[in-house]
Amino acid sequence: MVDLDDMRMFRALGTTHSLAGAARLLDVTPPALTVRLQKLEERLGVHLAVREARGISLTDEGTRLMLEAIDLLERLETLPERIAAEHQSVSGSLRIVAPLGFGRVHVAPVLRDFHLMYPNVKASLTLSDSPLADSAGADIVIHIGEMKDSSWVAHVLAPNERYLCASPRLAASLEALEHPHELAHLPCLCLRENDEDVSRWRFERASGRNAKQGKAVTVRVTGALSSNDGGVIGDWAMRGLGIMVRSEWDAGALIASGKLKRLLPQWRLAPAPIVALVPTRKGVPARVRLFLDAARAAMDPPPWRK
């Protein structure tokens, strides 16, 4: 059984990625938190976290528990406000900033339906190749991947893996590819987004319940082509110009249709969950809460996994 304290613990672990940081958030000692984590693993019969030199790393089971905990706690903590909002006339302005491709495909339809339900809300959607850089004055920023700026409050909308893939023809020529280190000598396509180091790709073994155990592998890749537009990178990959790392939400359908093929499926890249960022946890307007609810509903289950 998982109780509220367990869920708060995993929300804190997901925010800080360390036992010491989570203990500070929860106002407990690190040893007490370690004991609580061990007891929860014993009750569930699964391994939830692994200690690493840089902090703590969640297993697949631990990541799932963390995402579920964030969602359940958010719904529980905002229940009074959401109930009150149903009896109020929702109005005001709502500014949303989202990534170009994802915003066009998945956020724009949500805002369209939201407008039909709440026509008194004056809403705008800005699509950007760097949403955080264009976030001034935004009520909601849609972000994909790990958050580095802790000043924002993150609301997880949907899970999203990242895949290493290439065109079927290029993949056929790489059948002997077995280890990420080999990518350093192959043509790779780099997507510049979120101010990340696009030339460093980090992998972990992806086999069974102990997927996150063992040393991670970081590879510095090179290539003649890079872009800040995921659609451009995807087109180049499908034309056989190189190997790319791309989000499941975009690459999943292309892989299913045979236009792309996954490489090194025995290795796992860090996931890039879809999150909505808001400036504060308290005093969030009803229109923002209602849009977050609408976005979660639209992505449950994730459209890219249907």
Image: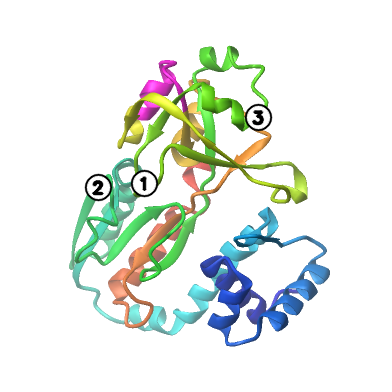
Question: Could you tell which of marks 1 and 3 lies nearer the N-terminus?
Answer: 1
SS label for mark 1 = helix
Crowd class of label 2 (few under 14; some 14 to 19; many from 20; radius 10 Å): some
Picture disc at residue 17: none
Crowd class of label 1 (few under 14; some 14 to 19; many from 20; radius 10 Å): some
Using the rendered view, name the quadrant where residue 152 is placed. Answer: bottom left
Amino acid marked by disc 2: Ser
Camera-near label (1 vs 3) is 3
Determine the CA span between mark 3 and mark 2.
34 Å
SS label for mark 2 = strand
Question: Could you tell which of marks 3 and 2 lies nearer the N-terminus?
Answer: 2
Q: Quadrant of the C terminus?
A: top right
Residue 178: percent from the left, percent from the top?
A: 67, 26
128 above or below 9? above
Residue highlighted by disc 1: 106
Residue at x 33%, y 53% (from the top left corner): 110
Amino acid marked by disc 1: His
- The residue range painted magenta reads 233-243
| Residue 78 located within the stretch drawn in magenta | no
35 above or below 193? below
Residue highlighted by disc 3: 179
Residue highlighted by disc 2: 128
262 above or below 169? below
Question: Could you tell which of marks 2 and 1 lies nearer the N-terminus?
Answer: 1
Residue nearest the observer in this picture, 73 or 278: 278
Answer with left or right where residue 8 lies relative to residue 135: right
Answer with left or right where residue 240 lies relative to residue 40: left
